[in-house]
Image (cartoon, rainbow, N blue to C red):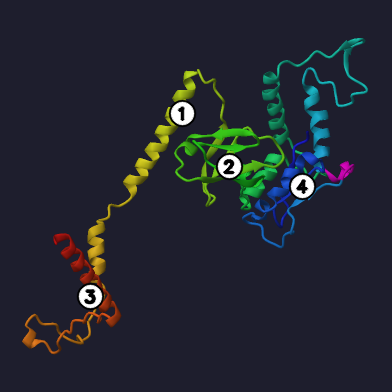
Amino acid sequence: MRPWWIIQPSACLKLYIDNGKEYGFATYLDDAMTLMVPGFHGPGRSMRVVNALPYNASAKPIERWFGDFESRYLSTLPGWISGNRMNKRQEAIGRTVAPYGTFEDFVPAFFGLLKAYHSMPTGKQSGLKGHSPNTTFQQHVVAGWSAITMSRDEVRAAVARRVERTVIQGAIQLRGRRWSCEELWQYTHDKVLVCDPVYHAPAELLVLDMKGKRLGIATPDVPLHPLDHRGAQSTAARAKAHRDAIVQMARSVPKIDVAARLMALGQDQPEVIPNEPAGKVSFDPSQRPARILMPKKPLIPEERRREQDERMAAQMDLVKRIVG
């Protein structure tokens, strides 16, 4: 896969990349590319990420550079077989080229050749006008150019979607897996924002709080067998970290005298002035301005009293007959 290439024109910073789908992540960097380079000013494009046309090698300076670097520098290494897969180089008839060595051997050799290329003057017709890349770079630095860098966290946040997740026992769920880190163990809220990469399967995730502030880098939570003592140790460590975070947060809270605050609140309230009473109740009956009249019992109707008299007379007759 060919690497993407950054071009620095005189107006603003642009990212000029191949048309392959593997570079789709670069569209998320467009906002980051709006940063203007110190020392260069002028109108910029609305889109600072530029895709080259497909099947148009002449529009890609990086393609010409690859060919030049391979033919002039990489070809000097033992084991070089050129880029023509239909006509492989051979050390002798019927014998393929011996490999250079291990990848660990090749890496320092490659960067050694790249350092040599940076120090070599180019041709007069090249874009560097006969100067070496190092000389051209130094001229831009003297003119006031400086690099704009991005940390790994910023790249993770730029090429990812922010999704909300619930923290349960110091871990979150994403893509069918549990993810955790020490910062999540100590997190005392319920929700976090997770930067979910758009174009690749993540090995680690950038976790933010609900205000967008960095919490930490979460890694997959490895499941352990129920009889594995490391599971109990991990659970105990997470619980302790969570308790310690709560204790630390409680210590940072200032102590408040609730009773003193309530009394101060009462003192600050305006006085309530009652109105004049409408009357006065005295214990001495002679001093009472008005007598209290007790309600009378209702009169018994005449018929009811007659019934009572008849009932009593009947009871007396019964008594006399019994007594004799």
Image position, residue 140 (x, y; %): 66, 49
Task: Identify the image quadrant of the C terminus.
Answer: bottom left
What amino acid type is highlighted by mark number 1?
Answer: Thr
Is residue 57 in the magenta section?
yes
**In the drawing, what numbered circle is on residue 309?**
3
Q: Residues within 10 Å of mark 3 (few under 14, many from 20)?
A: few
Which of the two labelled residues, at mark 3 and mark 4, occupies the earlier sequence position? Answer: 4
What amino acid type is highlighted by mark number 3?
Answer: Asp
**From the viewer's perspective, is 317 left or right of 248?**
left
Between the residue at mark 2 and the residue at mark 4, the CA separation in whole angstroms equals: 23 Å
Task: Identify the image quadrant of the N terminus.
Answer: top right
What amino acid type is highlighted by mark number 2?
Answer: Asp
Between the residue at mark 3 and the residue at mark 1, the CA separation in whole angstroms equals: 93 Å
Is residue 199 in the magenta section?
no
Which of the two labelled residues, at mark 3 and mark 1, occupies the earlier sequence position? Answer: 1
Please identify the residue farthest to the bottom as the structure is shown.
289
Circle 2 — which element? Answer: helix
Which of the two labelled residues, at mark 2 and mark 4, occupies the earlier sequence position? Answer: 4
User: Which residue position holds label 4?
Assistant: 16
Circle 1 — which element? Answer: helix
Between the residue at mark 2 and the residue at mark 3, the CA separation in whole angstroms equals: 108 Å
User: Which residue position holds label 1?
Assistant: 235
Circles 3 and 4, Cβ within 8 Å, touching? The answer is no
User: Which residue position holds label 2?
Assistant: 153
What amino acid type is highlighted by mark number 4?
Answer: Tyr
Circle 3 — which element? Answer: helix
Which of 147/205 is in front? 205
Q: Quadrant of residue 112?
A: top right
Task: Please state the extent of the stretch shown in magenta in the rendering.
Answer: 54-60
Between the residue at mark 2 and the residue at mark 1, the CA separation in whole angstroms equals: 28 Å
Q: Residues within 10 Å of mark 1 (few under 14, many from 20)?
A: some
